[in-house]
């Protein structure tokens, strides 16, 4: 089930968007949970409730006296992962919107026409996020979603998992890690490194450039495989 919130300060606009959602749900048979809000403050209040977790939010960029981008910025302080999609009649804040990691910026006049494509992209993104890797430390099984992992590094009898703000270590082998991961999500660029393809920024000679600014070595024997994985991730 996809859990969705819709926020628009105009009653007619809110109804129009929910009608589009209902039509899509009827055509596809997808399970949805939809909550509607006419004020940004109401949405933020709901998000601060730990029992309320949305997968995506359709947000008008102008909400009466409130700025939708500022609402999105506050949403990000509460939930970094929720997909924020701006639905608006205005193009003037598109660059500001992507500063808060907006997933989409959609003109209202095109929403009905593009909604199926948008939802396919949403489902694909959520599917990526639902994939996870598990490892064991001191008898405890711990789960990490793929999108949290930048790369794995082999160090003697241990494997380090490099995340955005920390590195986790557990006893194991990189070959065993590869067997557990879904094919295509990670690529072995070197005997010691297994990289999340979504974290690859580019390839420079025999170096793999990551979104974090790090550069990892590419073995000559693995270069073709790495290049193919990178090109596939761009599709």
Image: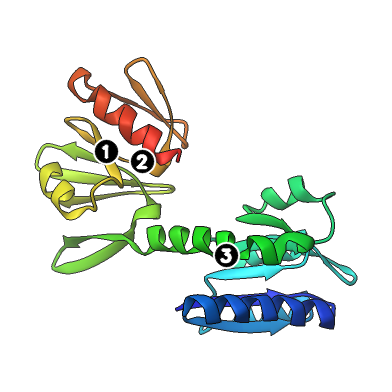
87 vs 104: above or below? below
Q: Mark 3 falls on what kind of element?
A: helix
- Give the image location of residue 124, x and y in percent: 44, 59
Give yes or no for contact between labels 1 and 2 (Cβ–Cβ under 8 Å). yes
Q: Of tags 3 and 1, which is closer to the observer? A: 3
- Give the image location of residue 3, x and y in percent: 52, 77
Q: Mark 1 falls on what kind of element?
A: strand
Q: Which is more N-terminal, label 3 or label 2?
A: 3
The residue that disc 1 covers is 187
What residue is shown at x 84% (from left), y 56% (from top)? 90
Is 155 situated left or right of 21 in this image?
A: left
- Which of these two is toward me, 187 or 144? 187
Q: How is the image coloured?
A: rainbow
Q: Residues within 10 Å of mark 2 (few under 14, many from 20)?
A: many
Q: CA distance from mark 1 to mark 2?
A: 6 Å
8 vs 198: above or below? below
Q: CA distance from mark 3 to mark 1?
A: 31 Å
- Give the image location of residue 94, x and y in percent: 76, 49
The residue that disc 2 covers is 197
Q: Residues within 10 Å of mark 3 (few under 14, many from 20)?
A: some
Q: Which is more N-terminal, label 1 or label 3?
A: 3
The residue that disc 3 covers is 116
């Amino acid at each position: 089930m996809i859990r969705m919130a819709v926020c628009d300060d105009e009653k007619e606009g809110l109804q129009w968007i929910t009608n589009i959602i209902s039509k899509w749900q009827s055509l596809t048979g997808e399970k949805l949970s939809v909550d509607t809000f006419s004020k940004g403050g109401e949405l933020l209040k709901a998000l601060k409730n730990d029992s309320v977790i949305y997968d995506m939010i359709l947000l008008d960029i102008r909400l009466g006296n409130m700025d939708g981008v500022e609402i999105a910025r506050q949403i990000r302080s509460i939930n970094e992962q929720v997909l924020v999609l701006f639905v608006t009649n205005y193009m003037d804040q598109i660059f500001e919107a992507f500063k808060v990691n907006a997933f989409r910026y959609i003109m209202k006049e095109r929403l009905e026409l593009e909604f199926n494509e948008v939802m396919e992209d949403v489902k694909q993104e959520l599917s990526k996020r639902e994939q996870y890797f598990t490892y064991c430390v001191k008898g405890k099984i711990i789960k990490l979603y793929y999108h949290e992992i930048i790369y794995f590094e082999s160090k003697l009898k241990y494997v380090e998992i490099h995340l955005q703000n920390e590195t986790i270590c557990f006893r194991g082998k990189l070959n065993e890690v590869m067997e557990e991961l879904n094919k295509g999500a990670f690529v072995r660029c070197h005997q010691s490194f297994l990289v999340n393809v979504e974290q690859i920024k580019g390839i420079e000679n025999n170096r793999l450039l990551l979104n974090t600014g790090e550069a990892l070595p590419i073995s000559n024997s693995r270069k073709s495989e790495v290049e193919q994985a990178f090109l596939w991730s761009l599709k």
